[in-house]
Image (spheres, rainbow, N blue to C red):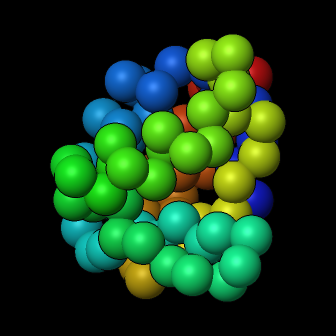
């Protein structure tokens, strides 16, 4: 799933922390990082943040309820 225009990283990570299963960030090279881990969150997003806004990222979810949480986040934070 593509997530667009993340402007509030703190709120985004709050949603990720509420997810039940692992959530993976897919890099441009196809590598996957579990971003439920705090260390992975900081390391992964340190590389993709530009000007405080993340224009687009690719996530893999492993639970329909987690997918719904992220979709609700995207809809509420347009």
Image mark count: 0
Q: Residue at x 37, y 24 (%)?
A: 10
Q: Position of residue 67 (x, y in %)?
A: 52, 65
**Residue 60 visible in rendering:** yes
Q: Is residue 50 above or below residue 4?
A: above
Q: Position of residue 36 (x, y in %)?
A: 27, 59
Q: Residue at x 68, y 34 (%)?
A: 54
Residue 66 appears in which quarter of the rendering? bottom left
- Which corner quadrant holds the C terminus? top right
Image position of 11 (left or right of 50): left
Q: Residue at x 77, y 46 (%)?
A: 56
Q: Is residue 77 above or below residue 71?
A: above
Q: Nearer the viewer, residue 74 or 7?
A: 7
Q: Residue at x 61, y 72 (%)?
A: 26
Q: Position of residue 51 (x, y in %)?
A: 69, 16
Q: Position of residue 22 (x, y in %)?
A: 31, 74
Q: Is residue 63 above or below residue 66?
A: below
- Which corner quadrant holds the N terminus? bottom right
Q: Nearer the viewer, residue 42 or 62?
A: 42
**Residue 64 visible in rendering:** no
């Amino acid at each position: 799933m593509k997530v667009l225009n993340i402007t509030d990283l703190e709120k985004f990570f709050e949603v990720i922390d509420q997810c039940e299963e692992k959530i993976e960030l897919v890099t441009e090279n196809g590598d996957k990082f579990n971003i439920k881990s705090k260390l992975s969150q900081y390391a992964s997003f340190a590389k993709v943040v530009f000007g405080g806004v993340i224009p687009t990222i690719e996530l893999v979810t492993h639970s329909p309820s987690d997918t719904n949480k992220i979709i609700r986040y995207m809809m509420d934070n347009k």
